[in-house]
Amino acid sequence: MIAAALDVRTLTRSFGSFKAVDEVSFQVRPGEICGFIGPNGAGKTTTMRICATLDLPDEGDVLLAGRSILEHPRAARHRLGFMPDSYGAYEHTTVREYLDFFARSYGLGAERERTIAQLVDFTSLGDLLEKATSALSKGMKQRLCLAKTMLSDPDVLILDEPAAGLDPRARIELRELVKALAEMNKAILISSHILSELGEMCDSVVIIEEGRVRAHGTVSGITDDLRTSEMHVFARALCGAETLEKALLEQPGVGSARVERDGVVFAFEGDEHQLAHLVVELVRRELRVIEITPEGIDLEDVFLSLTEGRVQ
């Protein structure tokens, strides 16, 4: 098995009597996109700040490629990139000046201009190099922050709500950038409240509430754990929704059915093979079925099932 690039081990962090993070543990491997999900106040940002060496835990540790960030924080900062949910854009600087400033801060020497050029190309900022950062759109500012985060070529990226406030096109473009970074073998921990997008891009998820991990695993593994023997299926036929509903209620394995949109949603006790037999029977009865779609479980279903929306 591939060793973890980011290994979070029983992190605990309290602020007075408030325990923001309570024995949180999970791993992210190279090339993996891990979604970090939880209600507001669940402990996501505190956990991310500890991983980024911006805060210290009361207990626990974080390992980057097997090395403690508590014992080697300076080395850790060159191996990880942290993109906060808000950042200072230095309004009186241009895009070029902004990236050059941070490149110098990272100690990049002769390779500084080449590195900046590569990241500008990657984030499609080439036409904006002489533009003031204050004049950039929200989406372009996020691209600029991502480029800055990548200056040290980190192995691990921690992205805190990078899609917040972006329009649909900017969110799609950001998602494609994140996928491209994973293809470069970067380990990515990303938080977002847009669960549908995390479901499309993430390999695994960590669900946290009240400072504790409620679930951690692959997206398919967690959704499979929530499945029951009963599936919900959407069906549509040219005979009409009411006729189809009546026919379905006469079939074995159908527990309930209701007309919805221009078809019928029904609960079915059985597996896909038994569902196939049901379809054969509907066709035999000449109901002219044109759609049968089992309704899957997504991240929103998982989140609502495993959390109660509480903070401590």
Image (cartoon, rainbow, N blue to C red):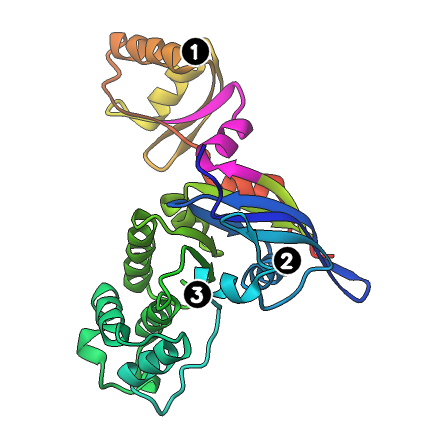
Hey, which residue is sitting farthest right in the picture? 17
Quadrant holding the C terminus? bottom right
Q: Which residues are magenta?
A: 216-234
SS of the residue at dot 2?
loop
Mark 3 crowdedness (10 Å alpha carbons): few <14, some 14-19, many ≥20:
some
Left or right of 116 on screen, residue 278: right
In the rendered image, residue 262, in percent from the top left (x then y), is placed at 32, 34
In the rendered image, residue 245, in percent from the top left (x then y), is placed at 39, 22
Q: Amino acid at mark 3?
A: Ala
Instruction: Find disc 3 in the rendering and name its residue.
Output: 164
Q: Amino acid at mark 2?
A: Gly
Of mark 3 and mark 1, the one earlier in the sequence is: 3
Q: Amino acid at mark 1?
A: Glu
Is mark 3 in CB contact (under 8 Å) with mark 1? no
Of mark 3 and mark 2, the one earlier in the sequence is: 2
In the rendered image, residue 143, in percent from the top left (x then y), is placed at 32, 69
**CA gap, disc 3 and disc 1:** 48 Å
Disc number for residue 250 = 1
Q: Look at discs 3 and 1 and give the one toward the viewer.
A: 3
User: Where 299 falls versus 277 (above or below)?
Assistant: below
Mark 1 crowdedness (10 Å alpha carbons): few <14, some 14-19, many ≥20:
few
Quarter of the image where one finds residue 31: top left
